């Protein structure tokens, strides 16, 4: 049995175990990913979503323990799962909006890109090689017990992989890559911690009639909270029901849901946002402000950024709560 076959099996096992544990720690990310990746409706049942992390963990464990025909069965199931994931990410990378696959819960940057596709191709190949180990009649644990010298070989391979990962790793500076709950693109501050005036980007939106909206003409009359949403995005679906209430609670701030669709699509997507929606069908304004979906930014009456951008459902909700608290404090101060 060639010792080289141990590495792809262990790679699959580690990926499945890390993925499963991460999904258990952040089940909301799994729910969102099922929507964002447009998983077939028949596979979106809550029981299947909750079972997925446990299936991954079980497969990861049995890839290490199983031998012979048992390993063939486990490797075949793993191969089928990885092929399904590959199919989903290939579809997702062609979508007009960036999609978070939720592959590892909230662990790391899980946006679907070309790198995600190549990673999944590598995992499919590793699962296929795992079948070869099972067909040889051996398995990972059996091989390690039979030849203890393989432990040193595996330790060296693991060290090389870790060093390579550390050398190649680069933290992203793209503000649109925020994971739910993380505030990105914070406004610059001076030595005293006060915000420095930062003009809002020049942005053009559309109203419900399809007419051009220039923010530079709207903001002098009232501060504007722009909430960027994309119909079909799972996290956006969680934010959307609160927009109308926020519009009332944050007065005199004007609240607008900026949708990543054309105005004509409002009636077939989110008609309940009629009267509160602007449109950014090509995402130009969203990118200019450094927002993801969902994301939010506050523009003051002076045309400067007053807060944000923030990205993710939790971060947007907390951002709105902070604005509401500041408005209440200002009202109390003004009443004295």
Image (spheres, helix red, strand yellow):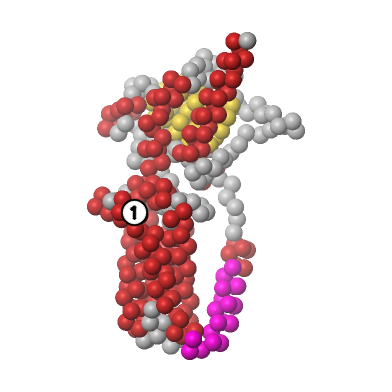
Q: Give percent across and percent down for residue 187.
A: 62, 33
What residue is at 37 percent from the left and 42 percent from the top? 234
153 magenta-colored: yes
Q: Residue furthest right?
A: 191
Q: Is residue 238 visible?
A: yes
Main SS category, magenta section: helix
Question: In terms of secondary structure, where does tag 1 sit?
Answer: helix
Q: Is residue 278 visible?
A: no
In the image, taking residue 19 as reference, residue 331 lies left or right, namely: right
Q: Nearer the viewer, residue 233 or 251?
A: 251
Categorize mark 1 by other alpha carbons within 10 Å: few (<14), some (14-19), many (20+).
Answer: some
The region drawn magenta spans: 145-162
Q: Give percent across and percent down for residue 319.
A: 53, 32
164 magenta-colored: no
Q: In this figure, which residue is indicated by the disc labeled 1?
A: 49
**Quarter in which the C terminus is drawn:** top right
**Above/below status of 149 relative to 238:** below
Q: Residue furthest left?
A: 42
**Above/below status of 289 relative to 178:** above
């Amino acid at each position: 049995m060639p010792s080289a076959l141990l590495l792809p099996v262990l790679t699959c096992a580690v990926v499945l175990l890390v993925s499963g544990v991460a999904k258990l720690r952040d089940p909301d990310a799994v729910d969102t990913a099922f929507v964002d990746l447009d998983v077939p409706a028949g596979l979106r049942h809550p029981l299947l979503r909750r079972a997925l992390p446990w299936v991954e963990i079980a497969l990861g464990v049995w890839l290490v323990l199983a031998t012979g025909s048992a390993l063939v069965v486990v490797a075949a199931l793993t191969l089928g799962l990885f092929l399904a994931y590959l199919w989903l990410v290939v579809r997702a990378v062609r979508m007009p909006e960036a999609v978070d696959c939720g592959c590892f819960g909230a662990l790391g940057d899980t946006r679907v890109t070309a790198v995600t596709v190549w990673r999944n191709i590598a995992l499919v190949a590793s699962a296929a090689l795992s079948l070869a180990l099972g067909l040889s009649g051996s398995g990972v644990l059996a091989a390690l017990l039979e030849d203890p010298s393989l432990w040193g070989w595996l330790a060296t391979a693991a060290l090389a992989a870790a060093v390579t990962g550390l050398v190649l790793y680069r933290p992203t500076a793209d503000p649109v890559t925020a994971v739910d709950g993380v505030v990105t693109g914070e406004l610059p501050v001076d030595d005293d911690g006060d915000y420095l005036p930062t003009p809002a980007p020049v942005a053009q939106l559309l109203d419900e009639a399809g007419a051009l909206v220039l923010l530079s003409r709207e903001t002098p009359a009232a501060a504007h909270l722009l909430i960027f949403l994309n119909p079909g995005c799972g996290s956006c679906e969680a934010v959307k029901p609160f927009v109308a209430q926020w519009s009332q609670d944050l007065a005199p701030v004007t609240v607008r849901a900026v949708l990543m669709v054309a105005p004509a699509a409002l009636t077939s997507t989110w008609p309940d946002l009629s009267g509160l929606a602007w449109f950014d069908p090509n995402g130009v304004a969203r990118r200019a402000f450094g927002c993801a979906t969902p994301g939010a930014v506050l523009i003051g009456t002076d045309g400067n950024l007053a807060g944000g951008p923030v990205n993710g459902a939790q971060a947007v909700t907390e951002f709105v709560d902070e604005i509401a608290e500041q408005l209440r404090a200002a009202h109390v101060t003004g009443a004295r």
